[in-house]
């Protein structure tokens, strides 16, 4: 009886073990694939909707809705987590933009937030103050005496982390909260730096950096260099 009982228990264990192993493997693989799915970079391009342009576009702007696209990309927040952001850009540059943000994602470069400026009623000041990364906005160039269109009005310029990367125009710092980032030798996350991940990512697609201007606009990257 004792022998039979032992055999029974062994055969039960023998039968159980592979099941347990399979179960554990499934849990481990399941966790790994779920993590991989959430961590994988996403970059999509679609038509712009009315809500994306409500306050950033009006008739008379140099490009219209037909020439603009909504690009959605994964980015790493300052919280270390993965977020999905949106940018309105020219249809001519969607490939470049996805490529840039794929590089930044891989480099784990932190970005505060990424929402079309229409969410800030088209106000560049409000968008910058919120440390928002954005592209298209039908507006005149800041500090332009002639009132020429900004490259943002063509959807061919992107401002990244405006607080960490302010625009320094004489005594003005845009946004004002960027004043603590005027000293570019104090290195902190999210900054555009010569030889850094952000400047290199845009350089990889031939975009130029406003940080090299006489009045440096550290947040600004554009196709034309203006
Ligand atoms: Zn800009």
Image (tube, rainbow, N blue to C red):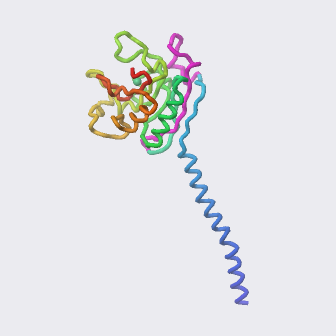
- Magenta range is 50-79
Q: Quadrant of the N terminus?
A: bottom right
Quarter occupied by residue 31: bottom right
Q: Where residue 24 sits: x, y (%)?
A: 61, 64
At 64% from the left edge and 63% from the top edge, which residue is drawn?
23
Quarter occupied by residue 204: top left
Task: Determine whether, in the image, residue 119 is placed left or right of residue 46.
Answer: left
All told, the count of numbered labels is: 0
Q: Where residue 19 sits: x, y (%)?
A: 67, 68
Q: Where residue 92 sits: x, y (%)?
A: 53, 23
Q: Quadrant of the C terminus?
A: top left
Determine if the magenta segment contains residue 70. yes
At 47% from the left edge and 20% from the top edge, which residue is drawn?
137
At 67% from the left edge and 69% from the top edge, which residue is drawn?
18
At 55% from the left edge and 46% from the top edge, which residue is drawn?
38
125 and 100: which one is in front?
100
**Quadrant field for ligand 1:** top left
Task: Determine whether, in the image, residue 145 is placed left or right of residue 5.
Answer: left
Determine if the magenta segment contains residue 150. no
Above or below: residue 49 compared with residue 62: below
């Amino acid at each position: 009886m004792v022998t039979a009982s032992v055999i029974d228990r062994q055969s039960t264990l023998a039968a159980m073990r592979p099941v347990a192993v399979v179960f554990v493997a499934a849990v481990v693989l399941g966790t790994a694939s779920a993590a991989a799915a959430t961590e994988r970079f996403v970059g999509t391009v679609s038509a712009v909707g009315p809500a994306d342009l409500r306050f950033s576009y009006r008739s008379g702007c140099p490009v219209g809705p037909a020439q603009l696209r909504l690009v959605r990309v994964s980015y790493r927040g300052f919280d270390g987590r993965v977020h999905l952001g949106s940018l309105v850009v020219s249809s001519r540059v969607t490939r470049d933009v996805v490529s840039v943000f794929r590089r930044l994602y891989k480099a784990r470069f932190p970005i505060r937030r990424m929402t079309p400026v229409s969410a800030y009623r088209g106000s560049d000041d409000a968008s910058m103050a919120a440390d928002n990364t954005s592209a298209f906005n039908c507006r005149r160039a800041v500090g332009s005496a002639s009132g020429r269109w900004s490259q943002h009005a063509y959807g061919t310029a992107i401002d990244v982390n405006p607080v960490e990367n302010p625009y320094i125009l004489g005594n003005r710092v845009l946004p004002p909260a960027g004043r603590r980032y005027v000293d570019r030798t104090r290195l902190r996350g999210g900054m555009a730096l010569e030889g850094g991940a952000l400047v290199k990512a845009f350089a990889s697609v031939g975009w130029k950096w406003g940080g090299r201007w006489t009045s440096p606009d550290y947040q600004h990257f554009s196709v034309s260099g203006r």
